[in-house]
Image (spheres, rainbow, N blue to C red):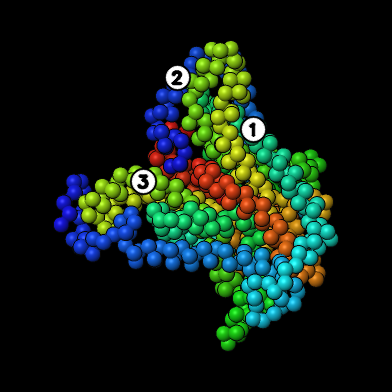
C-alpha cells in the first residue's frame, strides 16, 4: 500500500528493476526460482488450501461426532438455509459489523487527520492511541467483563454512586450486543487509524502549501486535496475492517459465549461453537465454508482496489 | 485578498478570519481542540489498562475500598509472585515464547525466499504465485480450523507444538511475504548481479548481499509474527487441550473459570502477559507500523 517502497519510488522503478534481470531460460535460473518459491507454496497449500477443500468435502457429508457418514450432497446447505439460528447469526454478524464499522472508520479517519497535523508530541500521542491494537482479544474481553461486572466492577460502582440501579451489561440481549460492539471499538479503532495515517503520508506537502497560498480554508483543503487522496484507502479500509469483524471469534466468545439467548452469536461464533463445543462437524464445516465465501466476495473487491492503485502489485 | 489560484481549487470567500495563524497554518482554537480531542481518546485507550495495572499492585483492602483509589496506598507484588508460582503462568509463558520463536523461524524460512524471487525475478508463474499469496492472506482462521483439527487428529498432532507452529506460520506467511517483498523491491537487483560477476552463486548473492540489506524488514516481520502468536486465543484453544500445552491467552481464560480467582491475581496475570507485546510495540513503533500497513491483509 502507500507506504510500501513500490509506492515511494513510483511503480516505474520497480518494473525496470525486474526487467534488468536476465530472462533466458536456464536450468540453473529456474531451479533457483523453484527452490525459493517452494517452501512458502507448500506450507500455504498444506495448511490453508487443502483444509479448505477438505472442509468443503466434510460439508457434503452427514456426520456423527467426528466421523463422516454417508455422502449427503447439498443436505447440510439446505439445512443451513432453513435453520432460523443461522439467520439470526447472520443478522447478528451484520449488526456487529455495521455497528463497529460506522464508529471505527470515521473515528480512525478523524484521529489520523488530527495526528497528521504538524504539532509537537504527535508521535507520542500516536503511540498511546495505538496501544489497544496490541492488546489481545482475550485480554480485552476479560478486562472489560471485569470493568463492567455487576457486583464489584468499577463501572457499576460508579453507576450506583450516581444513584442509578446496577446495570447488567452482559445479561440483557440488546445491551449485550451494544457492549460487545463498544469493546470491539475500543480494541480495533487503531487499525483504520493506522491505515489512514499511512495514506495521509502519501499526500505531498507541496499540495498543502499550494492550496494554502491560494487561501483555501481547512474544509476546502480537506475536500479537494486530502479526500481525493484518501478515497481509495477509505474503501479498502472499510473492506479490511469489515472482514476483521466478520471473522472475529475470541472477543465475543469469551465475553458472552454468544449469549444471552444467542443475542451476540455471530456467524463466526456459531461456526466455532458448532465445531468445537458441539462437535457437529457437518454443520461446522458448512458454516466455515459459508464464511469463507463471504470473505472471498469482499476479498475480490479488495484485491481489485489494490490493483487499481498499483498495477505492479502482482 | 489572496490571489486566485490556478486549477480547480475554489477559493473560499471568507479568509479574513484566518489571517493570524500560528504554527503550520493552524489557529490557536484548532490547536487546543486537537489536543483536547486526542487527550480524551488517549484516556479512553489507557484508563482500562492503567486501572488493571493499579489493581494488580494493590493490597486486597485497597481493591475493595470505596471510593476506589487510582494510586495504591501500598505497593505490593505478591499477586505477581502468586501467579508466577501457583497459577501455572511460567509453563504457559514458556509455551508461548517457544512456539512464537519456532513460528518466527519457520515463517521467515518460507516467506523470505518467496518474497525475494517474486520481487527480483520475472517468471511465468510469478503473478499466479502472488495472487495465491494475496488470496490465502484473506482466508479466515475460523474457516480452516475445523478441517485442520480433523486432519491433525488423524495425524496424531493434537496437543503438540508442531501443529501450532505449522498453523501459525502458514497463517502469517502470506502477510510476511508481502511485507518482505516491499523491502526487497527497494533493493536494486543490480547488487546481486554484481556479486554474481564477482563469483557468487545466486544463493550466496542472496544470502550475503541482499538479505543483510533487508534486515529491517526481517525485524518488522518477526515482530508481526510474535504479536500474532502471543495474542492468539482461537487457534491454540482449538488445537490443544492438555494443561502442559496451554498457552498464555488460554491460561488467562482458564484462570477466570477457576473457582475463587481474585481480581488481584487476574489483573497481575493480565499485566504480565500484556507487557511483552506493548513494550515491543512502543520500542519499535515506527517499523511496526510500516509493516502493519504493507501487510494489512488480515487482522
Please state the chain letter of the residue tagged with numbered disc 1 in the rendered image.
B
Mark 2 highlights which residue? A20
Q: Residues within 10 Å of mark 1 (few under 14, many from 20)?
A: many
Mark 1 highlights which residue? B110
Q: Nearer the viewer, residue A22 or B1?
A: B1
Residue drawn 76% across and 64% down? B77
Among the 4 quarters of the image, the one containing residue A19: top left
Please state the chain letter of the residue tagged with numbered disc 3 in the rendered image.
A
Among the 4 quarters of the image, the one containing residue B103: top right
Q: Residues within 10 Å of mark 2 (few under 14, many from 20)?
A: some
Residue drawn 66% across and 55% down? B275
Q: Nearer the viewer, residue B112 or A128?
A: A128
Element on which disc 2 rests: helix
Q: Nearer the viewer, mark 2 or mark 3?
A: 3
Q: Nearer the viewer, residue A43 or A153?
A: A153
Mark 3 highlights which residue? A203
Residue drawn 59% across and 71% down? A176
Vertical arrangement, residue A142 with respect to residue B129, above or below: below
Residue positioned most to the bottom:
A163
Q: Nearer the viewer, residue A176 or B75?
A: B75
| Mark-to-mark CA distance, 2 and 3 | 30 Å
Tell whether label 2 touches label 1 (CB within 8 Å).
Answer: no
| Mark-to-mark CA distance, 1 and 2 | 26 Å
Tell whether label 1 touches label 3 (CB within 8 Å).
Answer: no
Tell if the residue under mark 1 belongs to the same chain as the one under mark 2. no
Among the 4 quarters of the image, the one containing residue A133: bottom right
Vertical arrangement, residue B214 with respect to residue A87, above or below: above
Element on which disc 3 rests: loop
Amino acid at each position: 500500500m502507500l507506504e510500501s517502497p513500490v509506492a515511494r519510488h513510483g511503480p516505474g522503478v520497480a518494473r525496470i528493476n525486474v526487467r534488468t534481470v536476465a530472462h533466458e531460460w536456464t536450468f540453473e535460473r529456474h531451479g533457483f526460482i523453484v527452490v525459493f518459491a517452494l517452501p512458502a507454496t507448500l506450507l500455504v497449500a498444506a495448511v490453508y488450501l487443502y483444509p479448505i477443500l477438505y472442509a468443503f468435502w466434510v460439508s457434503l457429508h452427514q456426520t456423527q461426532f467426528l466421523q463422516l457418514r454417508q455422502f449427503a450432497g447439498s443436505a447440510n446447505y439446505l439445512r443451513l438455509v432453513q435453520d432460523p439460528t443461522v439467520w439470526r447469526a447472520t443478522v447478528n454478524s451484520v449488526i456487529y459489523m455495521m455497528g463497529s464499522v460506522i464508529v471505527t472508520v470515521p473515528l480512525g479517519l478523524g484521529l489520523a487527520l488530527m495526528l497528521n497535523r504538524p504539532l509537537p508530541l504527535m508521535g507520542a500521542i500516536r503511540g498511546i492511541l495505538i496501544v489497544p491494537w496490541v492488546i489481545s482479544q482475550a485480554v480485552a474481553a476479560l478486562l472489560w467483563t471485569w470493568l463492567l461486572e455487576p457486583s464489584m466492577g468499577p463501572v457499576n460502582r460508579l453507576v450506583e454512586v450516581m444513584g442509578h440501579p446496577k446495570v447488567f451489561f452482559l445479561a440483557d440481549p440488546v445491551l449485550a450486543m451494544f457492549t460487545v460492539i463498544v469493546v470491539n471499538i475500543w480494541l480495533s479503532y487503531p487499525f483504520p487509524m493506522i491505515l489512514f495515517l499511512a495514506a495521509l503520508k502519501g499526500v505531498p506537502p507541496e499540495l498543502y502549501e499550494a492550496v494554502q497560498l491560494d487561501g483555501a480554508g481547512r474544509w476546502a483543503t480537506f475536500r479537494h486535496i486530502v479526500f481525493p487522496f484518501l478515497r481509495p484507502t477509505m474503501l479498502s479500509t472499510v473492506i479490511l475492517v469489515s472482514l476483521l469483524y466478520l471473522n472475529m471469534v475470541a472477543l465475543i466468545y469469551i465475553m458472552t459465549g454468544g449469549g444471552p439467548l444467542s443475542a451476540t452469536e455471530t456467524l463466526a461464533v456459531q461456526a466455532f461453537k458448532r465445531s468445537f463445543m458441539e462437535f457437529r462437524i457437518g454443520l461446522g464445516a458448512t458454516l466455515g465454508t459459508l464464511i469463507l465465501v463471504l470473505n472471498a466476495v469482499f476479498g475480490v473487491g479488495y484485491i481489485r482496489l489494490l490493483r487499481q492503485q498499483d498495477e505492479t502489485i502482482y | 485578498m489572496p490571489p486566485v489560484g490556478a486549477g480547480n481549487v475554489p477559493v473560499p470567500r471568507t479568509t479574513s478570519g484566518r489571517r493570524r495563524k500560528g504554527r503550520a497554518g493552524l489557529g490557536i482554537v484548532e490547536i487546543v481542540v486537537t489536543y483536547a480531542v486526542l487527550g480524551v481518546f488517549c484516556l479512553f485507550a489507557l484508563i482500562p489498562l492503567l486501572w488493571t495495572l493499579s489493581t494488580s499492585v494493590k493490597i486486597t483492602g485497597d481493591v475493595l475500598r470505596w471510593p476506589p483509589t487510582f494510586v495504591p496506598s501500598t505497593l505490593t507484588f505478591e499477586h505477581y509472585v502468586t501467579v508466577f508460582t501457583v497459577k501455572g503462568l511460567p509453563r504457559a509463558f514458556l509455551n508461548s515464547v517457544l512456539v512464537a520463536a519456532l513460528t518466527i523461524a519457520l515463517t521467515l524460512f518460507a516467506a523470505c525466499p518467496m518474497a525475494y524471487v517474486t520481487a527480483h525475478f520475472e517468471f511465468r508463474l510469478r503473478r499466479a504465485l502472488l495472487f495465491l499469496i494475496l488470496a490465502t492472506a484473506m482466508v479466515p482462521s475460523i474457516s480452516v480450523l475445523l478441517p485442520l483439527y480433523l486432519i491433525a487428529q488423524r495425524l496424531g498432532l493434537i496437543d503438540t507444538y508442531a501443529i501450532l507452529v505449522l498453523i501459525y506460520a502458514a497463517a502469517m506467511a502470506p502477510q510476511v511475504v508481502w511485507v518482505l517483498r516491499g523491502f526487497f523491491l527497494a533493493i536494486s537487483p543490480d547488487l546481486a548481479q554484481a556479486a554474481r560477476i564477482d563469483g557468487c552463486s545466486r544463493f550466496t548473492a542472496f544470502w550475503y548481499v541482499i538479505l543483510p540489506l533487508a534486515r529491517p524488514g526481517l525485524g518488522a516481520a518477526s515482530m508481526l509474527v510474535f504479536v500474532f502468536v502471543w495474542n492468539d486465543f482461537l487457534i491454540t484453544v482449538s488445537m490443544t487441550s492438555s494443561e502442559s500445552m496451554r498457552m498464555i491467552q488460554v491460561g488467562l481464560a482458564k484462570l477466570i473459570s477457576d473457582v475463587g480467582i481474585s481480581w488481584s491475581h487476574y489483573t497481575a496475570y493480565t499485566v504480565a502477559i500484556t507487557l511483552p507485546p506493548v513494550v515491543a510495540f512502543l520500542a519499535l513503533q515506527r517499523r511496526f507500523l510500516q509493516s502493519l500497513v504493507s501487510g494489512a491483509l488480515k487482522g
